[in-house]
Image (tube, helix red, strand yellow):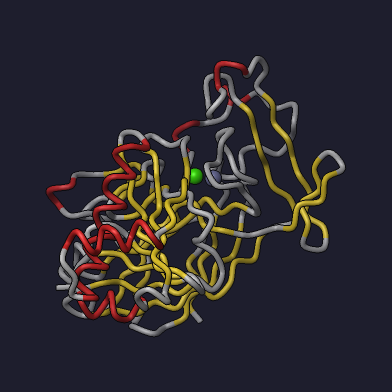
Amino acid sequence: MKVISGSKVIYKFTHDMEHVESIIPKEVVKVESNDCFFQQIVREDQVMTEIDYDKLNPATGPIYVEGAEPGDLLKVKILDINVADKGVAAAVPGEGALGDQVNNSTIRIIDIEDGYAIFKGVKLPIKPMIGVIGVAPAVEDGNWPTETPWKHGGNMDTTDIKKGSTLYFPVNQNGALLALGDCHAVMGDGELCFTGLEIPAEVLLEVDVIKEKTIEWPLVETEEHTMVIASGEDLEEALYSATNEAVKYIMNSLKLEWEDAYILASLSVDLKISQVVDPKKTIRAAIPKDVVPTERIIESLK
Ligand code: CA
Ligand code: ZN
């Protein structure tokens, strides 16, 4: 099995990134993922302003997938996420939903024991997830720092990007050029204070190509839902894009009038907040598979 070293990272998703490895469809690959601070934080008494901010949000890769061409979908199944035995969380003045109330920059190193993160006597079952994952953007979309989520993926910080889930990305460049980083051992929807439990990890992926199907925003398929992950300047803009896509998918796959698809979406689709702390905010619209199976949505794509 190919292993993509955590020393090979990017800080920007660009249309002309140089790949570090290539794989064939259905190949399983192991990716070494750095934490979002590139492991620069090891003690609670470190000063946040002394870390190198140019090294935030490294994404390992990119990986060239043979046969993936613009106009295709990249299908990425997350087989496993093995996190390290400790991680970092932080509160930083001005950051997060209540940034105005943070007086002291506060770093916490949190141990993981037997599948639990132990913090202040509270045992949280870990739910490992990938914060940053994406592909090369379209040329007209420009370059995207790894800290920002957009149509190519990036810093989507979505709790459903977890073991057992399958992601779908639009392929914009030959080889798709997949990269990932910023795993969290656990996080609540929203990532409200600015970090999850930031942690290095080894991620096992199975990557495949679906020819000649396109999507505007990434999808994540879980056991029960197909979720559109959309981002915008604020939650309203993200919500509009996610809802717009979800209604379109329901309309096209069930061959309904738009208004009926809109009503059916209102009866069945859950809107969830992914994150409120990155340069763009992220919402996901979760379409139940018993309303329309994922395969049917994919089939109906053009
Ligand atoms: Ca993140
Ligand atoms: Zn993170």
Left or right of 142? Residue 121 is right
Left or right of 46? Residue 3 is left
Residue 272, percent from left and from top: 46, 50
Residue 233: image quadrant is top left
Residue 3, percent from left and from top: 51, 72
Left or right of 124? Residue 98 is left
Image position of 42 with respect to 290: above or below: above
Nearer to me, 302 or 147:
302
Nearer to me, 71 or 263:
263
Q: How many marks?
A: 0
Residue 241, percent from left and from top: 26, 48
Residue at (24, 63) in percent of width and height: 261
Residue 153: image quadrant is bottom left
Residue at (20, 77) in percent of width and height: 300
Residue at (41, 61) in percent of width and height: 286
Residue 127, percent from left and from top: 65, 59
Image position of 105 with respect to 125: above or below: above
Which corner quadrant holds the C terminus? bottom left
Residue at (65, 14) in percent of width and height: 103
Image position of 279 with respect to 169: above or below: above
Nearer to me, 144 or 164:
164
